[in-house]
Amino acid sequence: MQASEMAFYFFSVVIVISAMLVVISRNPVHSVLWLIATFFGSSGLFILLGAEFLALILMIVYVGAVAVLFMFVVMMLNINFDQLRSGFTRYLPVGLLIGLILFVELSLVFSHWIPANSYDSKIQDSTIGDVENTKQLGLVLYTDFILYFQLAGIILLIAMIGAIVLTHQRKRNVKRQDILTQIYRDPEKAIELKDIKPGQGL
Amino acid sequence: MSYLDILTIGPELILVLFCLVSLLVGSFYDSIKTSGFIFLLTIGILILIAILIYISPYKTIPAFGGAFIRDAFATYFQITILISVVALLVLSKDYLIKYDLLKFEYPILIAFATLGMLVVVSSENLLVLYLGIEIQSLSLYVIAAFRRDNVRSTEAGLKYFVLGSLSSGLMLFGASLIYGSTGSIEFKEIFIAISSDGFLLGIMAGLVFLISGLAFKASAVPFHMWTPDVYEGSPTPVTGFFATAPKVAAIAILLRVLFDCFGSAVESWQQVIIVLSFCSMFLGSIAAIGQKNIKRLMAFSSIGHVGFALIGVACATEEGVAAVLIYMVLYVIMNIGVFAFILNMEREGVAVTSIESLSLYSEVSQGQAFFLTILLFSLAGIPPLVGFFGKFYIFSAAINSGLIWLAVSGGIASVVAAFYYLRIVYLMYFGAKKELLTGNMPFTHWLLLIVTATLMLVGTINLFGLEGPARVAAVSLLN
């Protein structure tokens, strides 16, 4: 067995086991940690495929941001996970049945999968040459793909505007820091020195 | 990217720049006055863009490596969308001020939604299509929930968001299946692949998912379940907006995808569209009968109208496409008029949406009742009003392409639908004595109501010359 094959089996086993543990572990914090393990395994698979950029993005975005966000949600919101999980055994047979149906359907589709004749000529291997795919993406992102890239940026902007519009409360009587008045404050006028004799009040 | 690409996409670029600048201005000088100013400016910019698109010489040249094209078809729909957005913005201002909803984000989100619609109509590949739809729907989710302290409105926003993301997911899945079978996301390349290699299994699965996603956006049965709730819950100007521009855009994308991408495999999608159309027409007509809320009624009415428009799509002929183009424009005009009326239904300063409250409205305002009657007759498709001609074009196209039974069932559905439109007219003139509505109407709303109703009468002469551009647009789509 080659090293890459061994690595593939290792990562796959890690992914499958930790994905199962995400569902069945009792402690929700453990579930999130197992989820992180799943992400790590998947990024290993991407590296095996030669898509190192995708692997790194998966690490940074999913492990670094999304999983941590999950962790915050789990720890901050008081969700009763036992109650959520109470129907597990009851729904298990139906869930398994649906999973089986989906599996059969997908295998039916993929066993008859015939791509168009022109397919191979259009799909390029991303690892051709000595240009690694991070650089390849960099070469096209602002040139050929500028329209897509900017449109995606607009989508994110709208999401941000939406979040602010729907949650931001405009309270008028909140005390905020006003930097300008702070800067222009004159120490001469702000502080007044008084000489107080002992035994006397002000 | 070249100089020519920038020029081609110029109008959209102006819109984006405008949105960004006014967003900055709005957040620094946040007051009712600035919001009102940005509101008016948005209307101005949208009109400007409509003019620019009309006179733009950069047509039929695909920009960005064939991702974006502004052919006659795109121009036709873009101008329709822009005009309807402008009309709805004009209508919504008074309402927003009255219910303390006039924030500067409202016109900006509407402008972003318009941008999404403009992009999507001229998309020439699946990625731009998806991105445009997302820009459009993300803004719509937010403005559906714009009245955030109202339970109904937030419910509408949330429902729309959850179901909308589901449909986007379906669409993406379909697009990836198509990409997986043809190796391309360009409409042209997919068209060539289908013509040379036949209709592969993966493409078929992808097409079904893609149509489901688009049918959701157009709210065709069986993907309509969100429509009544969202229409009822959203603030009324937003409901009016939902009923016009996004609907037009959804039908436009459907046409674009079906003809540009799958034009060589008509028989594979024709039955799907026929089923969607048949179900939409009948559900739209029958389910509307029991409605008590006029916004819900308009939701079912819009479902029914989408069904009629889909008959034209199912014809898969040039005549059918031209009929759809005409029908959508007429539909938008009628809806603008009706919503100009609905926005002003109130009693003692409180908005009322029940249909019952319209009884004896003719005693409140003879003029409004009369003009609304004309619009409702037109929506029902009663000759000699323009709405009849819209349906007439659709049905004759269906008959000419051999879909006689669909045309006949369309006729039956429109007779059923006429019942609930006429019931409103009946209530307005012969309803039971009840508490009457106030019947006040700002000048702009009056104007739009009169203009749209007059168009319904005048348009019977030559349909405002709409037929010519519609034919040109249909030809440009089919070639």
Image: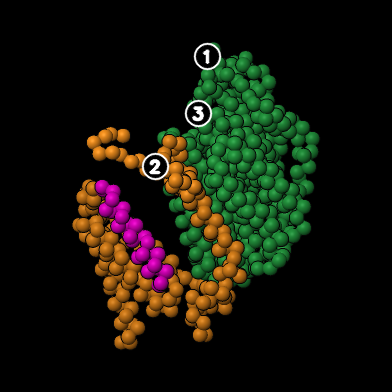
| Residue positioned 40% across, 72% down in the render | A55
Q: Provide the residue designation for mark 2.
A: A192
B344 is higher (above) or lower (below) than B300: above
Q: Colour of chain A?
A: orange
For the residues bearing labels 3 and 2, Cβ distance under 8 angstroms: no
Q: Provide the residue designation for mark 3.
A: B293
Is disc 2 on the same chain as disc 1?
Answer: no
Secondary structure of the residue carrying tag 3 is: loop
**Magenta span covers which residues?**
A55-79
Q: Label 2 is found on which chain of the structure?
A: A
Q: Colour of chain B?
A: green
Q: Is residue A44 left or right of residue B359?
A: left
> How many numbered dots are placed on residues in this image?
3
Indicate yes or no whether the magenta region holds residue A62. Answer: yes
Q: Is residue A146 left or right of residue A63?
A: right
| Residue positioned 34% across, 67% down in the render | A39
